Amino acid sequence: MKNKEKKQGNVSRPPVVVILGHVDHGKSSLLEAIKDLKITEKEAGGITQHIGAYVASHKGKEVTFVDTPGHEAFFAMRSRGTKLADIGILVVAADESIKEQTKEAINHLKEAEMPFLVAINKIDKKNIDIEKVKEDLSKEDVFVESYGGNVPSVNVSAKEKKGIEDLLEMILLLAEIEQVTDKKADCTSGVVVETQRDAKKGVIATFLVKSGMLKKGDSVATRGSYGKVRKMENFLGEDVDEARPSTPVRITGPKGCPDAGEEFFVFEKLEEAKKFAEKGGEKKEEKESSPSEKTLNIIIKADVAGSLEAIESSLEKIPQDDVKIRVLKAEIGNVTESDIECSKTMNARIFTFRTKTEKGTQKTALREGVDIKEFDIIYELIEEVRKSAQEMLGDEIVRTEIGKVKVLAIFRTQKNRQIIGGRVTKGEVKKGGEVEVWRGKEKITEGKLINIKKEEKDVERILENEEFGMLLESKERVEEGDVLVPYKEEKVKRKL
């Protein structure tokens, strides 16, 4: 890996901030409000594409905001051991207080051991109760400063752009307390925020530099991709030659799509970067399934790496003891002819999230009998994968006990048949039904009731507490005192 030009002591850098909270509590609105106030109209006009991160200035100091694609993706990044951000903002609506996703966000922040502050949003609305929000937070072990805790809180209105200055002031204060610095390291490194595939430019990735200096022309690699930084743009779309710690940049040049949340490193030579990527790629390979193992092969195509990360994280939660879900390809971009060929060869199903399938590719899929399932909601995609896996399980035979019979007498014994008398002690008995034969706690055999009689007449069934005679067919002989257990068997669809 490439050494820094000069090893110095830790120096301060802009804090990297992530915003979490309930879906309707104003995360995106808050980001937009900060953009509107802190990025001039001229600058904002330069933002032509979503890059997943941007920089805002406050009193001469900068703050980097990462626009995460959702809690699942954020958690997946955290679970890789990658520290994406330094500080979290928990957004809670003043009129609705704590919701289920708020609790999830709190858990993610705690598990990541990330310092955070609370932004109580929508203070412009009627019927708000800020004190209730603080009280509800305390029930989740989040104690704001006014409640004797150490978690800062700021009242804001993203809609009216109130409290934004106070919020940024608090972020910078928290960064100073937490001593957010560029810690000494042997090489330049950072985190992949987002990845996209452009038909003309190839792979375009958003890198967030965490340590050192990333420069145009550097050789970079993640665990499964590598390349030279051919072009580098800041969040405004302007060409830049270098990026310091906490700076998000869009780079063009990687071979392969790095995953969101992966670490990247800078190397002296491209060959070294390639070796690192290939070594990391080997770790991602899956062993072949045994012929007896049920396996659902799938191909996933998504709009951006954040979506892909969230999908793969959700798929891991599907039980795979009975059916292994094997992801052959998980890539950014539209469905290609190569995907169709892979699907046909490997008997794989294609699932897409917010991507398009060109007409030519659709015709090929139709001709080859390849089904492409398209989704705009991750939950629905995951449920369809689960359903596909369940279909491979087939039916399960469920045996249900319908009664109990105590054997009272043995009247006649033939080769595999006996005429016996008994009493129904529970449930009922039906003619032609299957039975288990129990002697004490041991099941000695199974049999079938060829015929049943009550008061010398053939009947179809006998009810509880009634005595009757029966012709039992079984391999083992039944004795007085044995218990017959009639049962029925049904085919039931198995579930994961």
Image: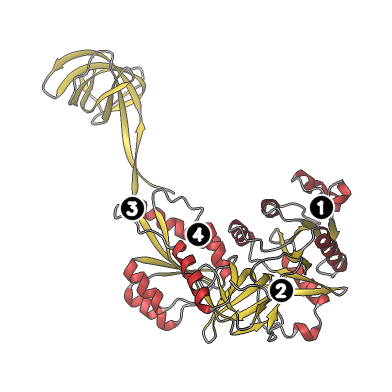
Foreground: disc 3 or disc 4:
3
The residue that mark 4 highlights is 382
Element type at marker 2?
Answer: loop
Q: Amino acid at mark 1?
A: Val
| N-terminal-most mark, 3 or 4 | 3
- Per the model, the C-alpha gap separating discs 4 and 2 is 48 Å
- Per the model, the C-alpha gap separating discs 2 and 3 is 55 Å
Question: Quick check: marks 1 and 2 in contact, CB under 8 Å?
Answer: no
Q: Which residue is painted at 77% across and 54% down in the image?
A: 96
Element type at marker 3?
Answer: loop
- Counting from the top left corner in percent of width and height, residue 440 is at 32, 17
| N-terminal-most mark, 1 or 4 | 1
Foreground: disc 4 or disc 2:
2
**Image-based side of 218 in relation to 46, left or right:** left
Foreground: disc 2 or disc 3:
2
| N-terminal-most mark, 1 or 3 | 1
The residue that mark 2 highlights is 6
Question: The N terminus is located in which quarter?
Answer: bottom right
- Per the model, the C-alpha gap separating discs 1 and 3 is 51 Å
The residue that mark 3 highlights is 293
Please tell me which residue lies in front, 405 or 23.
23
Is 14 above or below relative to 121? Answer: below
- On residue 345, which mark appears? none
Element type at marker 4?
Answer: helix
- Counting from the top left corner in percent of width and height, residue 59 is at 88, 73
**Image-based side of 377 in relation to 161, left or right:** left
Q: Which residue is painted at 81% across and 52% down in the image?
A: 151
Circle 3 crowding by C-alpha within 10 Å: few under 14, some 14–19, many from 20: few
The residue that mark 1 highlights is 151
| N-terminal-most mark, 2 or 3 | 2
Q: How many marks?
A: 4
